[in-house]
Image: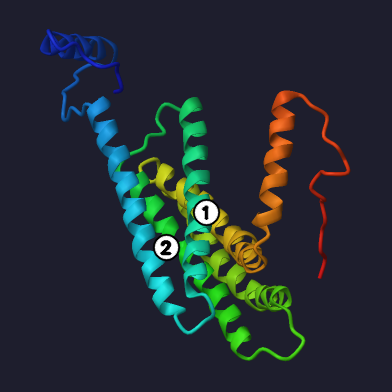
Amino acid sequence: MRTRSLSVDQPLQEQQAVIEGLSAEFGNVARERLESVGPTVSQESTRSAVLAVAGASLVILLYLTWAFRKAPHPLRYGVCAILAMLHDVILVVGIAAIFSAFNPRFEVDALFLTALLTILSFSVHDTIVVFDRIRENLINRRSGETFDGIVNHSLVQTLPRSVNTQLTTFFTLSALLLFGGASTFNFVLIMLIGLVSGTYSSLFNAAQLLVVWEHEEWRYWLPKRWAELRALIAGTPINPATATPRTVQVS
């Protein structure tokens, strides 16, 4: 039975009133457990989630920098993996906020935090597979090969492995979502969302960030984008001659 927060002055009376009302409707009713979720618990859960994500990000950054220490610019691999991982965290938290707005039973609790940390491991694991193949191809680099081409070839090589591995987990989680019951529904749903997000972010976010960093594209791309954003906010028409070109490379 879910109720609003009970009064601080008369909690016992309000509890008894709830029991009497249920007894009148359904017969003999006994209270087995009482849980209260207030702002303090919510703040503690939020703080624990932030600290857990920050701590995991720092450890992962240090580990990846050490693991790719023989590759050119090893710090880039760790930073790009963390950025892709944070994308998954923001996406999952945003979708959870949307779900909670339409379903009051969707709560951010210890199970949500467990699912979030599990998603981080899925995302980083898949990213490491892609980065490791990029590192191997860079070591065996042939003359004339560009960094973009090596990254693209590495993605093609790891794509079947990534998709097949994640599909096995996806089918298992789908079965739990359909037949696992209400107690694990929120946990499995968050895991499914994070699994899909972690798979595509490893392939379409992390590797591309490496390419952007390699060419230092932000030096000329970011100022133009910032000028376009300011013009959009101010309602000023964008000059096509100075606008950032939209190009698509197909390989």
Q: Residue at x 70, y 75 (%)?
A: 156
Placement of 132 over or under 221, stated as above or below: below
Q: Secondary structure at mark 1?
A: helix
Q: Position of residue 45 (x, y in %)?
A: 29, 39
Placement of 26 over or under 61, stated as above or below: above
Between 6 and 129, the residue placed more toward the observer is 129
Name the amino acid type tagged 2: Ser
Task: Name the quadrant of the C terminus.
Answer: bottom right
Between 23 and 108, the residue placed more toward the observer is 108
Name the amino acid type tagged 1: Ser
Q: Residue at x 43, y 43 (%)?
A: 185
Q: Would you say residue 37 is visible in this rendering?
A: no
Near mark 2 (Cα within 10 A), the count class, few <14, some 14-19 or many ≥20, is: some
Q: Secondary structure at mark 2?
A: helix
Q: Position of residue 7 (x, y in %)?
A: 19, 11
Mark in the foreground, 2 or 1: 2
Distance, label 2 to label 1, CA atoms, is 19 Å
What is the quadrant of residue 154 in the picture?
A: bottom right
Q: Residue at x 29, y 18 (%)?
A: 3
Q: Position of residue 129 (x, y in %)?
A: 53, 75
Total count of labels? 2
**Residue indicated by mark 1:** 174
Between 133 and 78, the residue placed more toward the observer is 78
Relative placement, left or right, of 40 versus 191 is left
Q: Position of residue 97 (x, y in %)?
A: 47, 33
**Residue indicated by mark 2:** 121
Q: Residue at x 83, y 29 (%)?
A: 237
